[in-house]
């Protein structure tokens, strides 16, 4: 794809000198395109496709910045009648994996796992930074859900 992956346009620390930072409008259009792609994977195919690795690196942008979901190596196909899948182990990339893939007692694994990953990716697109940073000193700095909790519930304004 001519424009490479989404990650080279959204992370402040990754944006290359010859690449521009995308406008909010362009990012919004990309986010909508990804959502439509996920809807197609979940409802538009003959079988449901649970990707399990939705992240900026797996979103390629064509010459018009239209997003394409790639890397189906961890995907699982299910019939349209199946809404819940069984898995022996978690699949995906840390920071994007839905909690139910680790903790079976909080919910079933379904297409909603892709939606969770999509939401984490949207937070990265808006924040301009990765949602997990292993080089930080406090847990609240590592994971976006902790930051969002602090921002919304506790009233913290610092990212």
Image (tube, helix red, strand yellow):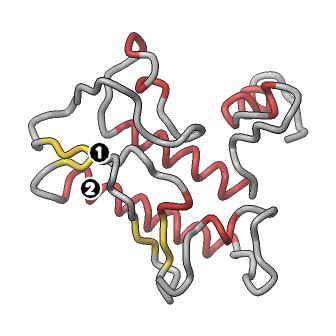
Q: Residue at x 35, y 62 (%)?
A: 37
Residue 57 image offset from top left, x and y in percent: 54, 61
Mark drawn on residue 50: 1
Q: Residue 23 vs residue 62: left or right?
A: right
Specify which label sits upstream in the sequence, 2 or 1: 2
* Rendered view: 92 above or below 137: below
> Where, by quadrant of the figure, is residue 19 drawn?
bottom right
> Where, by quadrant of the figure, is residue 7 drawn?
bottom right
Report, in whole angstroms, how far the alpha carbon at label 2 lies from the one at label 1.
Answer: 7 Å
Mark 1 and mark 2 in contact (Cβ < 8 Å)? yes
Q: Which residue is mark 2?
A: 41
* Rendered view: 22 above or below 138: below
Nearer to us: label 2 or label 1: 1
SS state under label 2: helix
Mark drawn on residue 81: none
At label 1, counting other C-alpha atoms closer than 10 Å, the crowd grade (few under 14, some 14-19, many 20 or more) is many
Q: Residue at x 33, y 53 (%)?
A: 73
Q: Residue 85 vs residue 125: left or right?
A: left
């Amino acid at each position: 794809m001519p424009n490479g992956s989404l990650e080279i346009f959204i992370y402040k620390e990754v944006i290359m000198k010859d690449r521009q930072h995308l406008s909010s409008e362009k990012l919004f259009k990309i986010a909508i395109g990804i959502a439509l792609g996920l809807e197609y994977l979940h409802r538009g195919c003959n079988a449901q496709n649970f990707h399990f690795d939705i992240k900026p690196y797996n979103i390629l942008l064509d010459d018009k910045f239209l997003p394409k979901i790639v890397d189906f190596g961890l995907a699982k196909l299910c019939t349209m009648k199946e809404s819940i899948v069984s898995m022996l182990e978690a699949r995906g990339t840390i920071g994007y994996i839905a909690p139910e893939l680790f903790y079976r007692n909080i919910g079933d694994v379904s297409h909603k796992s892709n939606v969770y990953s999509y939401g984490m990716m949207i937070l990265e697109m808006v924040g301009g930074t990765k949602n997990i940073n292993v080089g930080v000193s406090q847990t609240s700095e590592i994971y976006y859900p902790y930051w969002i909790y602090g921002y919304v519930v506790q009233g913290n304004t610092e990212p």
